[in-house]
Amino acid sequence: MTRGQIEELDRCFPKPNPYTRWLNREQERNCKSGRLLPARGLSLFAPALGWQVAKSFADEGQSLPPGISPAPWLRANQYLLNHGPADLPVALAHMLSLPASRPQSVLLQALMLCDGAACEDLAALCGYDVEVIQCYDALFWNVLERKEERDYIDRIYPHGSPAASRDGSPIDLLALAHKSRRIDVVLTVAEFAHPAGEPTSLAEQYQKIQHNCLVAALHGLALGAASEAENPALKPALKIISKNPNQAMSSQKEQQTANPGDAILLAYQRHLNPTKGDNSASEYNFAPVVGVTDSIPNYGIRT
């Protein structure tokens, strides 16, 4: 979505709305001093604008205004409101945005800026479905249609030297993409290759990112992070469990006595040891994460 399209959309949205209220709360939370001007419309420089709008409306139990909202925004809003069956491309795009999937998302973000990088090319390179790439760009990054907007690109891509530092830190793929705009350069440095003709299925990608999400949620709980703000993977992890009966609590007693940490831990253990006849997880060769499953505190969810 281009700058002009965002400005046109902003003129159509009612004011105030859940997004402007959310943005004002965020400004108050992040500003330690100084006078704040109230947010009056959509942000032109927020890569995750689509997700922020969809989520802010969903948090207030509202659907996005029909007829003026982009299709991926509408889908994300309905996904967050739990209306209808799970939208797997939106769920995958969301999970790619979480810290547990940072290596995959950084590579995708770098490739998106490169010249000639269409959704079909990115899908073939990274093994995602085209629809997942489209949802991720529309909801979390918004680069494919804004590559020539230099003020926007300079805000979200570092433009210093991409070279590795003396302390052994890896080369910055985002800075490299900003400097070269070449897919072959980014892939060579990332040492990334997807087997030609062997794309990873949507279900397989979803399963792998589910695992990363559960691990991230368990890490947070083990460190005492029990709120959505402290542990952003927590709510998606619980959503995974609620949508997948194979990972849910199997008995009434389990359901009555379990806390969220127990539920996530059980789902993680069933990823590692699927029940007889269920091969959905065994093919991925998941390994236990040392120190994570040893002791999960009995925390509730604070939102």
Image (cartoon, helix red, strand yellow):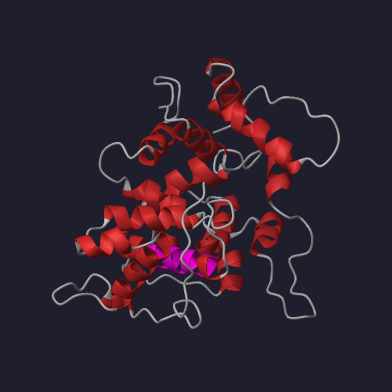
Total numbered labels: 0
Question: What residue lies at 58% left-to-right and 32% top-to-bottom?
Answer: 2
Residue situated in front as seen by the camera: 49 or 255: 255
On the image, the x and y values in percent for residue 238 come to 38, 56
Q: Is residue 149 visible?
A: no
Quadrant where the N terminus is found in the figure: top right
Q: Is residue 299 visible?
A: yes
Q: Is residue 284 magenta?
A: no
Q: Residue furthest right?
A: 34
On the image, the x and y values in percent for residue 115 come to 58, 51
Q: Is residue 212 magenta?
A: yes
Q: Is residue 283 left or right of residue 123?
A: left
Boundaries of the magenta span: 209-220
Q: Residue furthest left?
A: 277
Q: Is residue 84 left or right of residue 116?
A: left
Residue situated in front as seen by the camera: 259 or 239: 259
Q: Is residue 11 above or below residue 23?
A: above
On the image, the x and y values in percent for residue 279 come to 20, 74
Q: Is residue 264 above or below residue 181?
A: below
Question: What residue lies at 68% left-to-right and 62% top-to-bottom?
Answer: 176
On the image, the x and y values in percent for residue 54 come to 47, 35
Residue situated in front as seen by the camera: 116 or 17: 17
Quarter of the view holding residue 190: bottom right
